[in-house]
Amino acid sequence: MNPEIHLAAHHLRAAELRAEADAHRLALAARRPAQDLRTRVGWTLVEVGLRLASVPPKPQIA
């Protein structure tokens, strides 16, 4: 294979990989705020569920 063709193919593939990495990075950055909200709502639901599931202590008769 001609070295110049090999080098051109390498540059083309490197540019494709950089574009793919940029797209992936942008997709992750766009998704993070929703993930934070989802996490907070999830933990709030867990806390509410634990409060509903716990049995209140019985008063002690002295």
Image (spheres, rainbow, N blue to C red):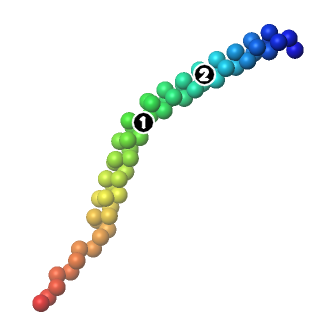
* Residue in the image at 45% along x and 30% along y: 29
Task: Report the residue marked by disc 2.
Answer: 18
Vertical comparison of 7 with 40: above or below: above
Residue 61 falls in image quadrant: bottom left
Q: Position of residue 18 (x, y in %)?
A: 60, 22
* Residue in the image at 23% along x and 74% along y: 56
Q: Is residue 26 left or right of residue 62?
A: right
Task: Report the residue marked by disc 1.
Answer: 32
Q: Residues within 10 Å of mark 1 (few under 14, many from 20)?
A: few
Q: Secondary structure at mark 1?
A: helix
Question: Which quarter of the figure is the N terminus placed in?
Answer: top right
* Residue in the image at 74% along x and 12% along y: 8
Q: Residues within 10 Å of mark 2 (few under 14, many from 20)?
A: few
Q: CA distance from mark 2 to mark 1?
A: 21 Å
Amino acid type of disc 2?
Arg
Q: Secondary structure at mark 2?
A: helix
